Structure formats: structure tokens, C-alpha cells
Image: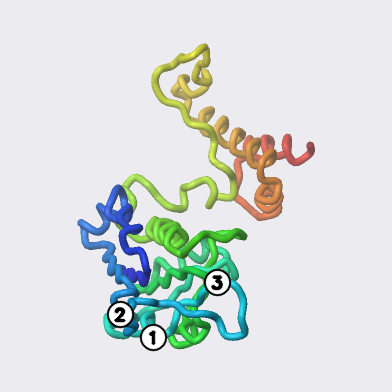
């Protein structure tokens, strides 16, 4: 998958070369093309913004450097603009974007970009939540990391994006590793039993309990949906549904 990024701060995308995403690049699964918008400005002072028509605080990123950067690099595919007024990123959108062969992400700054940029790029606005950050770079990395997990070959062979508990409808159960006891706290006995059916049921109940306590909205949705559950899983779910 080809991922193009238009930004004023290309150095912020260094983490894309690390860990899981870095391996995907090395294996030819992902390709990142990161372009500094400022390199395309025709302003002698290298400005990329100007005051907004109609007045108001802040500055607005101008059309010329963004569009020239976009066109001169031959960027295409689905265009996205990271914006708090956009569609909120979720698993469904991430999986949809992961099916694209190429996407172009525009990272805004200041008070945003001239609206004509979005129209010329036919850009869809995407948000990572109801809050405002100083720029679009961090949201872009969140988007990339999220969608990359749905691309075949990015995750290790034994992993699956849809195995993540949040995508299954429940929050994740607690994890433990060695040593068995530390600071007076022990690993739950069931995890040492070797009984995988009991372990699965324990994990399911912990996930149900956490979701009911911390995300009642997710819990209600999980309960309302038709799911293939075993008799014992249904009994566990009923314990928390009837609270």
C-alpha cells in the first residue's frame, strides 16, 4: 500500500520506520512518501500561510504550496484531511481504508487549510476524537498505525487484527507474565492450571466485567448483538447483564 503524507513537519514521521510498520516497509508491504509542503511554496520568505478572509485569530494554510506539492508528486488515491470535524476513526473505517492501494493524507496546522484545498483534492475529513491537537501529524500516525493492522502481512502470522478485544466488542482482559509472584501479588491460579477451557472462560468474564464497568456503552452494544456464545459464556454474560 502506498501512503503519501503532505506535512510541514516530515521529521515527526520518524516512528513510521520503527517496529511493525518499519518491518512492513522493509518487506515491501507499505510505502511511505513524506513531502514537506514548505518546499513547494512560491513565497520568497517560504511562507505557507496567510491571514483569513473575514478576520479572526490565527493563520490559514494557503492553496498554492499544498496543491503544488500534491500535483507535482503525482499523488493520488483516496485523499484524507486530519480534522476534528471529520468522521471519527473506527475499526470499520480503518479496514475500509486498508483495502485501498494508495491514500494521500494532508496534515493541517494553524487554524487549518483553505477550504479550496479540500475541494481540489476531493479530501475526506477524518478525526481521531473530539479534541484539538496542534497539527495533523499525530492524528495521521494514529490513522496509519490503525489501518496498517488490517493489511495482510503487516501483523505477525499468528496475530489477527480482528482478534483484538476492542474489535470483538469487549475491552481486553488482564495479562500476566513471569514471575509468578511479585510485590506480594500472584498470577491468578486459573492461568497456571493448563485447562484452556477454564482459561478462556476466565478471560471472557474478565473482559465482560471490565467492559461493563468502564464502557457501559460498548457493553450494551455487545449484549444487544447476536453472537455465537457457549452456554457457559451466556451464563457469565447474564451475571453482568442483570446487575
Tell me the residue at 47%/20% (across/down): 193
Q: Quadrant of residue 25?
A: bottom left
Tell me the residue at 46%/77% (across/down): 61
User: How many angstroms separate mark 3 from mark 1 (CA)?
Assistant: 19 Å
Instruction: Indicate whether 65 appears above or below 129.
Output: below
Instruction: Indicate whether 233 appears above or below 88.
Output: above
Badge 3: few (under 14), some or many (20 or more) residues near its Cα, within 10 Å?
A: few
Residue where numbered disc 3 is placed: 58
Q: Position of residue 45 (x, y in %)?
A: 33, 77
Tell me the residue at 53%/52% (across/down): 167
Q: Nearer the viewer, mark 3 or mark 1?
A: 3
Q: Earlier in the sequence, mark 2 or mark 3?
A: 2
Residue 45 visible, this orientation: yes
Q: Position of residue 58 (x, y in %)?
A: 55, 71
Q: Is residue 162 left or right of residue 207?
A: left
Badge 1: few (under 14), some or many (20 or more) residues near its Cα, within 10 Å?
A: some
Q: Nearer the viewer, mark 2 or mark 3?
A: 3
User: How many angstroms separate mark 2 from mark 1 (CA)?
Assistant: 8 Å
Q: Position of residue 1 (x, y in %)?
A: 31, 68
Q: Which mark is residue 29?
A: none
Image quadrant in which the C terminus is located: top right
Tell me the residue at 36%/81% (across/down): 65
Q: Earlier in the sequence, mark 2 or mark 1?
A: 2
Residue at disc 1, secondary structure: helix
**How was the colour assigned to the protein in this rendering?**
rainbow
Instruction: Indicate whether 89 appears above or below 105.
Output: above
Q: Which mark is residue 64?
A: 1
Residue 231 visible, this orientation: no
Badge 2: few (under 14), some or many (20 or more) residues near its Cα, within 10 Å?
A: some
Instruction: Indicate whether 233 appears above or below 176.
Output: below
Q: Which mark is residue 40?
A: 2
Amino acid at each position: 500500500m502506498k501512503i503519501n503524507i503532505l506535512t510541514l513537519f516530515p521529521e515527526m514521521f520518524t516512528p513510521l520506520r520503527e517496529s511493525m510498520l518499519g518491518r512492513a516497509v522493509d518487506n515491501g508491504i507499505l510505502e511511505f512518501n513524506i513531502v514537506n509542503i514548505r518546499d513547494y511554496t512560491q513565497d520568497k520568505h517560504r511562507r505557507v500561510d496567510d491571514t483569513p478572509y473575514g478576520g479572526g485569530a490565527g493563520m490559514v494554510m494557503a492553496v498554492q504550496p499544498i496543491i503544488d506539492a500534491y500535483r507535482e508528486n503525482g499523488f493520488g488515491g483516496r485523499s484524507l484531511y486530519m480534522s476534528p470535524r471529520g468522521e471519527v476513526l473506527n475499526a470499520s473505517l480503518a479496514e475500509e481504508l486498508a483495502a485501498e492501494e494508495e491514500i494521500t493524507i494532508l496534515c493541517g496546522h494553524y487554524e487549518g487549510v483553505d477550504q479550496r484545498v479540500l475541494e481540489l483534492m476531493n479530501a475526506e475529513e477524518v478525526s481521531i476524537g473530539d479534541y484539538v491537537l496542534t497539527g495533523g501529524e499525530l492524528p495521521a500516525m494514529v490513522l496509519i498505525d490503525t489501518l496498517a493492522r488490517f493489511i495482510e502481512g503487516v501483523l505477525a502470522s499468528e496475530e489477527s487484527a480482528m482478534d483484538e478485544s476492542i474489535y470483538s466488542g469487549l475491552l481486553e482482559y488482564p495479562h500476566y507474565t513471569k514471575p509468578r509472584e511479585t510485590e506480594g501479588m500472584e498470577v491468578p491460579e486459573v492461568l497456571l492450571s493448563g485447562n484452556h477451557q477454564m482459561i478462556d472462560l476466565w478471560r471472557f468474564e474478565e473482559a465482560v466485567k471490565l467492559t461493563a464497568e468502564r464502557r457501559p456503552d460498548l457493553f450494551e452494544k455487545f449484549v444487544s448483538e447476536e453472537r455465537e456464545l457457549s452456554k457457559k459464556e451466556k451464563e457469565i454474560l447474564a451475571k453482568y447483564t442483570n446487575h
